[in-house]
Image: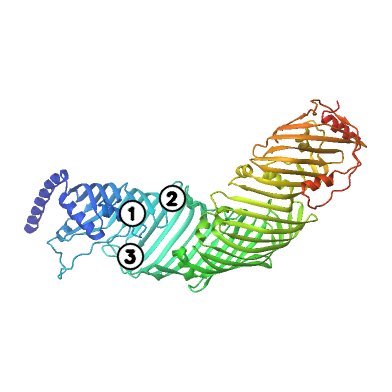
């Protein structure tokens, strides 16, 4: 008992002595610890640690408080040469930790519980591959006896538990050109100095939250040779479950050869939920995405031993208008086995499938790791029922080369697009940068990035109310120019031929179109020109035009050339006729048109119309004038003639204003008088052949039906509508 009493007395005196000293140490900067801590961190990481203020308390338990803590990041080459300090990897306003006293006598700094409050972390990867998260300790000099040289004492730092609250993490990957930022509510790591450290991480960005839990093999002071990993990731959006992922397995010799034996998997309900964390990803709308893979291999070349990918519906309209996937499956069970592809989807209203194989898993892994330098075989078929269009060649992130051969029973995108039957394609397509086309795939980017030579033919094409037979075309894409020459078909009783050039080699896309002739739905052409719906029927076009620009307005403004347009056995609506002749025209519904023809010279944003003529059962119209292509401004001089049985009544009109608000007025004759001419024989001559020949630039075309007699009641109503009779 006496011995125990003496020991207690000595211990009490020591506590009083230490406690008194702690009052002093708490008021002073603990420089003795800072020097050793800075040296230890630099020796173990190769980075420089800066601590503005450091205090040590011994009561009620030994602990440390640091303010203004900064850990340097990796140096850039030019900064090192100029002597500039490396940007900080970590900046923390306050760090608190429990300090082990006894390990100090063994030249070890042991922190049992570290709390880091509101740190800012900046993670960079430089173009040469060096990164902030890769530490390179300086090489210790070999003194032969294993002890430090120059009398400098070696200190080790170890940490058991780290708690981080409200961390802000930013990254800048200069190799993949990716940047980002995310906030962490808390990060907790336990057992860092043990055999199985565990992790609990919670973060959020916008409405998205994630929780990462798991454990690894020994990390400190030296990473274990057999390094097991086991992690689970749970995603939520606005508090609702969104996805799960896991990583399990072992990395052998992680600091050396790095042999992998890993299982990776996950599922995601909505692909776009990831945009909460990566707002610039611009992901398509996809559902029910799942991935499972087994990873083996070593070093910088991990290899997928097995892979299974499944998706539900994915919208692909941004890549191909009107397209989407209904489901997709990618499967392979061995690294030397080709990756099987089974995809079902739609192009507009048409169901299509994609079947075949890509390269082996080993080749696909290499492609994923180094896409610009790797190519893999591709053997796929676009399937429509029993027909297919085969694509065979090589696919890479850089160069790709594919032959296309086969027949599709039908190509029916739906909407406003034509429908074709038994589409046959024979061709070859290449690109020097596949990834660039995936990232930027506007028409001008595709034409600049592809080389293509193909023959296309189909026995039957339908578009709106028109049909074509034996359509063929030779298409070449090279040097940023797409040329379809010739495009030939039979339709509307006429042999048709055209040449189309899309030149994207310059800064502004340019177009050339030659028609000898071409028959198109008049409604489609009116839509392209931005004109109102004036007439219905097949529109025959002849002539050559050119234009340039990225938008419809610019293309209309730069349109130049000559065009002749004609319609036989069509119709014109009452609204269109009122646009031309005045608001009081009494026509309801549509009026049959035996023939319509116009010819114009186009330049400087205007169409100079030298012929504008139309023949109906009881109205004949001739004229000329100008139309502004961008402004739709009208300056038309028209001579409508109403048929009166065996005679006629005619007057002159001038139409100004715009398509949307025309202003028709009677136009005076050469003598300055307004008048109405009544009489003459209107049935002896058929004007259609003459006006159609002029509109077709002398070419052939279908003839209109024979003229029919008009009705007197309608004639008188028309005269009154023109203001000729009251």
Relative side of 530 to 94, left or right = right
Vertically, is 506 above or below 388? above
Residue 180 coordinates in the image, percent (x, y) = 41, 50
Residue at the spot of label 3: 217
**Mark 3 / mark 1, whichever is N-terminal:** 1
Mark 3–mark 1 CB contact (< 8 Å): no
Give the secondary structure at mark 1: strand
Residue at the spot of label 2: 209
Residue pushed farthest front?
671
Residue at the spot of label 1: 188
Give the secondary structure at mark 3: loop
Instruction: Determine the CA span between mark 3 and mark 1.
Output: 16 Å
Residue 564 coordinates in the image, percent (x, y) = 74, 47
| Local crowd size for mark 1, using a 10 Å CA cut-off: few (<14), some (14–19), many (≥20) | some
Q: Nearer the viewer, residue 175 or 259?
A: 175
Residue 333 coordinates in the image, percent (x, y) = 50, 72
Residue 196 position by quadrant: bottom left
Relative side of 331 to 300, left or right = right
**Mark 2 / mark 3, whichever is N-terminal:** 2
Relative side of 42 to 622, left or right = left
Instruction: Determine the CA span between mark 2 and mark 3.
Output: 27 Å
Mark 2–mark 1 CB contact (< 8 Å): no
| Local crowd size for mark 2, using a 10 Å CA cut-off: few (<14), some (14–19), many (≥20) | many
Instruction: Determine the CA span between mark 2 and mark 1.
Output: 16 Å
**Mark 2 / mark 1, whichever is N-terminal:** 1
Residue 272 coordinates in the image, percent (x, y) = 51, 52
Q: Nearer the viewer, residue 660 or 71?
A: 660
């Amino acid at each position: 008992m006496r011995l125990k009493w003496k020991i207690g007395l000595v211990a009490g005196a020591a506590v009083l002595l230490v406690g008194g000293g702690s009052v002093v140490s708490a008021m002073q900067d603990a420089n003795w610890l800072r020097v050793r801590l800075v040296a230890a961190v630099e020796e173990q990481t190769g980075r420089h640690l800066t601590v503005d203020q450091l205090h040590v308390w011994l009561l009620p338990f030994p602990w440390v408080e640091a303010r203004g803590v900064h850990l340097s990041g990796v140096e850039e080459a030019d900064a090192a040469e100029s002597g500039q300090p490396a940007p900080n990897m970590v900046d923390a306003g306050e760090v608190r930790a429990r300090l082990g006293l006894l390990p100090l006598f063994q030249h070890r700094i042991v922190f049992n519980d570290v709390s880091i409050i509101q740190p800012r972390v900046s993670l960079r990867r430089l173009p040469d591959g060096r990164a902030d998260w890769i530490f390179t300790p300086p090489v210790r000099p070999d003194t032969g006896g294993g002890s430090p040289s120059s009398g400098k004492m070696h200190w080790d730092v170890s940490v058991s538990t780290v708690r981080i609250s409200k961390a802000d993490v930013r990254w800048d990957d200069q190799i993949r050109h990716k940047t980002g930022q995310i906030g962490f509510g808390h990060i907790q790591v336990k057992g860092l100095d043990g055999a199985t450290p565990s992790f609990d991480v919670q973060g959020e960005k916008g409405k998205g939250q994630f929780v990462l839990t798991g454990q690894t093999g020994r990390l400190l002071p030296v990473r274990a040779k057999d390094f097991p990993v086991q992690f689970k990731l749970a995603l939520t959006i606005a508090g609702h479950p969104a996805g799960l992922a896991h990583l399990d397995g072992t990395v052998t010799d992680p600091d050396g050869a790095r042999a992998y034996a890993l299982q990776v998997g996950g599922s995601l309900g909505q692909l776009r939920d990831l945009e909460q964390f990566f707002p610039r990803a611009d992901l398509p709308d996809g559902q029910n995405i799942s991935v499972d893979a087994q990873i083996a291999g070593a070093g910088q070349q991990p290899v997928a031993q097995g892979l299974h990918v499944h998706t539900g519906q994915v919208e692909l309209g941004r890549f191909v208008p009107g397209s989407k996937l209904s489901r997709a499956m990618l499967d392979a069970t061995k690294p030397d086995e080709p990756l099987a592809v089974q995809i079902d989807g739609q192009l507009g209203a048409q169901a299509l499938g994609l079947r075949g194989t890509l390269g082996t898993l080993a080749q696909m892994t290499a492609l994923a790791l180094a896409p610009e330098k790797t190519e893999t075989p591709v053997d796929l078929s676009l399937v429509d029922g029993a027909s297919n269009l085969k694509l065979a060649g090589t696919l890479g992130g850089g160069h790709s080369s594919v032959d296309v051969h086969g027949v599709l029973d039908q190509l029916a995108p739906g909407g406003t697009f034509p429908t074709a039957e038994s589409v046959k394609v024979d061709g070859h397509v290449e690109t020097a940068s596949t990834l660039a086309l995936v990232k930027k795939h506007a028409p001008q980017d595709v034409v600049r990035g592809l080389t293509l030579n193909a023959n296309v033919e189909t026995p039957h094409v339908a578009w709106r109310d028109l049909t074509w037979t034996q359509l063929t075309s030779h298409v070449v894409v090279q040097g940023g120019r797409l040329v379809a020459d010739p495009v030939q078909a039979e339709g509307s009783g006429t042999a048709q031929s055209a040449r189309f050039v899309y030149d994207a080699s310059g800064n502004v896309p340019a177009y050339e179109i030659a028609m000898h002739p071409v028959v198109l739905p008049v409604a489609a052409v009116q839509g392209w020109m931005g004109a109102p719906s004036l007439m219905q029927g097949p529109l025959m076009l002849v002539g050559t035009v050119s234009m340039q620009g990225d938008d419809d307005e610019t293309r209309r403004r730069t349109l130049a050339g000559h065009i002749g347009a004609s319609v036989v056995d069509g119709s014109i609506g009452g609204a269109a006729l009122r646009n031309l002749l005045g608001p009081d025209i009494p026509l309801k519904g549509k009026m049959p048109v035996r023939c319509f023809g116009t010819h114009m010279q186009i330049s400087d944003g205007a169409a100079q119309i030298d012929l504008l003529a139309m023949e109906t059962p009881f109205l004949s119209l001739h004229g000329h004038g100008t139309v502004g292509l961008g402004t739709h401004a009208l300056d038309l001089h028209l001579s409508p003639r109403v048929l009166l049985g065996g005679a006629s009544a005619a007057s002159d009109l001038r139409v100004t204003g715009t398509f949307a608000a025309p202003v028709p007025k009677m136009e005076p004759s050469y003598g300055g008088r307004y008048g109405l001419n009544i009489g003459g024989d209107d049935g002896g001559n058929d004007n259609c052949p003459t006006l159609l020949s002029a509109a077709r630039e002398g070419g052939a075309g279908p003839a209109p039906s024979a003229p029919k007699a008009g009705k007197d009641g309608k004639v008188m109503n028309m005269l009154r509508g023109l203001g000729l009779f009251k």
